[in-house]
Image: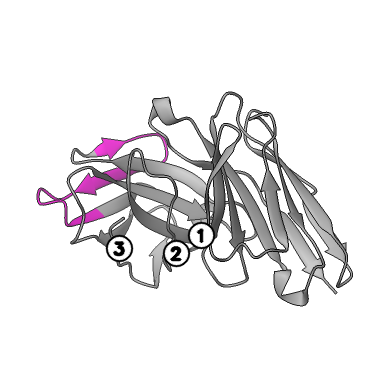
Amino acid sequence: DAKTTQPPSMDCAEGRAANLPCNHSTISGNEYVYWYRQIHSQGPQYIIHGLKNNETNEMASLIITEDRKSSTLILPHATLRDTAVYYCIVRSAAGNKLTFGGGTRVLVKP
Amino acid sequence: DTGVSQDPRHKITKRGQNVTFRCDPISEHNRLYWYRQTLGQGPEFLTYFQNEAQLEKSRLLSDRFSAERPKGSFSTLEIQRTEQGDSAMYLCASSLVRDGNTIYFGEGSWLTVV
């Protein structure tokens, strides 16, 4: 699976949109971009995934560039409960595991 | 609750004792995964099953670790002769291959070896 690069940390203001970038320049054509988050002391929570089209669900939006070498996770209205470590992971749909990198530690401030 | 269930959530044991963790995956999920996470690090893959077959084991899974999924449903992870370095959160996850294979995690089992 291709590797990803994320900023180690970022702050955002409560009520504002949080935009989390991820680079995955070596992504293959059959690999999806997955996002998970992990709130302190809890198991990772699935957020969203996509192949090449932009995706939206009740938690977030995923914007993937046309060349698929990078993506952005958007939390539209960040709340204090969104404070967590966010992981961007590239994996094929048939892949047998997720490989976690360092993630981005997001702190939502009042 | 229809999520991945893990038991116990917390375990404190003395060095040298054996411990066993249980995982109940989401119903009908055919893949089950075990991960380990130490403080400040991301989860690390240990092993996974498809139905009852253990298909991959990480080098992290030493001889003291054994995982089973005898009937293709729940799974157990046993650690024999625990060491202080085994202190970590052990995460279980599951997925359904024919339904996009998205992996869902449980809340984890915390192990402290004293």
Residue at x-position 81% and y-position 70%: B113
The residue that mark 1 highlights is A84
* Element type where label 3 sits in the image: loop
Quarter of the figure that contains the N terminus of chain A: bottom left
Q: Is residue A79 visible?
A: no
Crowding at dot 2, Cα within 10 Å, few <14 / some 14-19 / many 20+, comes out as many
- CA gap between label 2 and label 3 equals 20 Å
Q: Are marks 1 and 3 in contact (CB under 8 Å)?
A: no
* Element type where label 2 sits in the image: strand
Picture layout, residue A1 above or below residue B96: below
Residue A66 inside the magenta-drawn segment: yes
**Circle nearer the N terminus (2, 3):** 3
- Nearer to us of marks 1 and 3 is 3
The residue that mark 3 highlights is A3
Which labelled disc corresponds to residue A56? none
Q: Are marks 2 and 3 in contact (CB under 8 Å)?
A: no
Q: Are marks 2 and 1 in contact (CB under 8 Å)?
A: yes
- CA gap between label 2 and label 1 equals 6 Å
Which chain letter goes with mark 3?
Answer: A
Crowding at dot 1, Cα within 10 Å, few <14 / some 14-19 / many 20+, comes out as many
Q: Magenta segment, which residues?
A: A55-71
